[in-house]
Amino acid sequence: MKLSICMITYNHEDYLKQAIDGVLMQKTNFDYELVIANDNSPDNSDSIIQEYINSHPDGYKIKYLHNKVNIGMMPNFINAFENCSGKYIALCEGDDYWTDEFKLQKQVDFLENNSDYVICFHQAGINENGIEIEDTLTVNTKQTTTIDDLAKGNFIHTCTVVYKNNLFDKFPDYFYESPIGDYFLHMLNSLYGKIYCINEKMAVYRVHDTSYWSSKKQEERTLIWINFIKNIKNNFPKKIQKKLEYQIVKLELDSGIRPKKISITKKIKLKIKNIFTKKKQ
């Protein structure tokens, strides 16, 4: 059995060594490969990767894809993904890193022993420009969830996930131009089984000013997310579409955007639910 780690990178020279070290320190009873897709970074990333391949004792585990021209985030991810041959796939972008040498073993053991689950993730530390901050994304997540929960909003950090490969035949057309890949991927995978959360911090998700998402203002992020949800919802069953539409309405209300086609009753229900959610937190 083999697992593939999918790592995309662009201008991550300040973080890349830590990302690769976190992968190559993994202790497992199965084989794994690290697929690195460098999207023609103009920094020193290529030299760093080549040094690992040539000098690290486990450098042979690295499958290196070096784009000669910059093709963009999603095409780069798809290129990396299509070169992953493992039964399972783990994700770790070049600016994040893993902190537990048994992370992969714990996640694969769970998935191997629980065939009704297709995704296993865990909690993460958050590093924002060198400062540790609270993780609000997964803090209230149940141990077992399904696509019904995920359709209400993302609670999975990219660098924490391991999932079963080859659950679906091909990506939807919109995936190739989507501004957000991880949530869309998790949603597609969760059509085929349950999601499990290990209550341990085994990775660090890095937030910095040069990353695609963190470099944008909150208002712009909200608009991107709303448009993104609108574009992906038709790929899912009707009951999931309704939950995604509910997510859109909530985002519009929270951000002050006037929602389209929403009844007064639904507005009141959403506001009441938000009040009780905040009280619980």
Image (cartoon, rainbow, N blue to C red):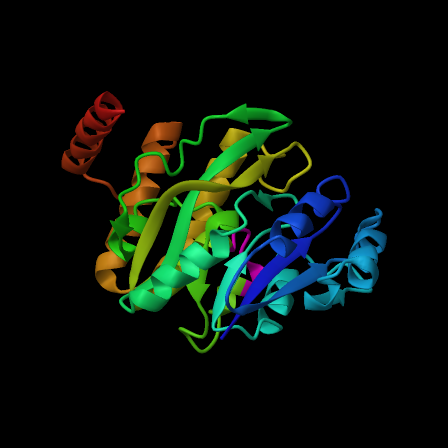
Q: How many marks?
A: 0
- Magenta: main secondary structure equals loop
Question: Which residue is farthest top?
Answer: 279
Return the x and y of residue 134 as percentages of the image width and height. Answer: 45, 26
Give coordinates of residue 112: x percent, y percent.
36, 68
Q: What stretch of residues is rendered in magenta?
A: 176-181
Q: Is residue 204 left or right of residue 148?
A: right
In magenta stretch: residue 266: no
Using the image, determine if residue 274 lies above or below residue 1: above
Task: Specify the farthest residue to the left.
Answer: 265
Quarter of the figure with the C terminus: top left
Question: Does residue 259 appear to the left or right of 157 in the view shown?
Answer: left
* Snapshot quadrant of residue 80: bottom right
Looking at the rendering, which quadrant does residue 35 occupy? Answer: bottom right
Q: Position of residue 128 (x, y in %)?
A: 59, 28
Residue at (34% x, 48% y) in the render: 197
Of 25 and 172, nearer the camera is: 25
Rendering coords of residue 64 (x, y %): 74, 66
* Residue farthest toward the bottom in the current orientation of the protein: 169
Residue depicted at x 47% and y 73%: 87
Which residue shows up at 42% across the image and 57% down it? 107
- Answer yes or no: is residue 151 visible: no
Q: Is residue 117 visible?
A: yes
Q: Residue at x 57, y 55 (%)?
A: 26
268 above or below 249? above
